[in-house]
């Protein structure tokens, strides 16, 4: 199974590729990579929240990674 850091890196690369017409991730500035890693981390957190919500609907509803909304 892939670790969280690897998942974040894969998602960040995918987001970067879409946003930058498939330009090379390896040549991107480090600060830009960090920005895409933050986007990726937020996306993964949101998916996790939604999955947990679908497993246990009484706990939360699907909002954003920083918004836990009571059901």
Image (cartoon, rainbow, N blue to C red):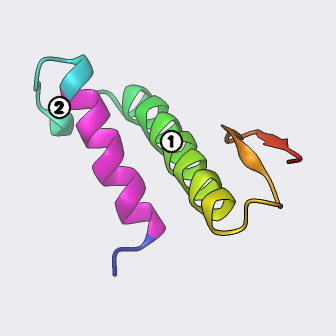
Q: What range is drawn magenta here? A: 4-17
Residue at 60% over, 52% down: 50
Could you tell which of marks 1 and 2 lies nearer the N-terminus? 2
Q: What element carries label 1?
A: helix
Magenta region includes residue 7: yes
Along the viewing direction, whichever of 45 and 41 lies nearer the viewer = 45
Q: Residue 69 carries which label?
A: none
Q: Name the residue under label 2.
A: 27
Q: Tags 1 and 2 in contact by the CB under 8 Å rule?
A: no
Image height of 36 relative to 11, above or below: above
Residue at 85% over, 48% down: 71
Image height of 26 relative to 55, above or below: above
Q: Which residue lies furthest to the right in this view?
A: 70
Q: Is residue 55 left or right of residue 3?
A: right
Residue at 19% over, 36% down: 25
Quadrant for the N terminus in the image = bottom left
Q: Report x, y in % for residue 44.
A: 50, 50
Image height of 14 relative to 21, above or below: below
Neighbor class of circle 2 (other Cα within 10 Å; few <14, some 14-19, many 20+) is few
Q: Name the residue under label 1.
A: 43
Q: What element carries label 2?
A: helix
Residue at 74% over, 46% down: 61
Q: Report x, y in % for residue 15.
A: 30, 32
In which image quadrant can residue 49 be found?
Answer: bottom right
Neighbor class of circle 1 (other Cα within 10 Å; few <14, some 14-19, many 20+) is some
Predominant SS along the magenta part: helix
Which of label 1 and label 2 is nearer to you? 1
In which image quadrant can residue 67 be found?
Answer: top right
Q: Residue furthest bottom?
A: 1
């Amino acid at each position: 199974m892939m670790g969280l850091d690897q998942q974040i890196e894969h998602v960040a690369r995918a987001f970067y590729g879409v946003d930058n017409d498939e330009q090379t991730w390896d040549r991107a500035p480090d600060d830009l990579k960090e920005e895409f890693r933050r986007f990726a981390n937020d996306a993964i957190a949101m998916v996790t929240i939604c999955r947990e919500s679908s497993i246990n609907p009484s706990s939360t509803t699907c909002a954003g990674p920083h918004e836990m909304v009571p059901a």
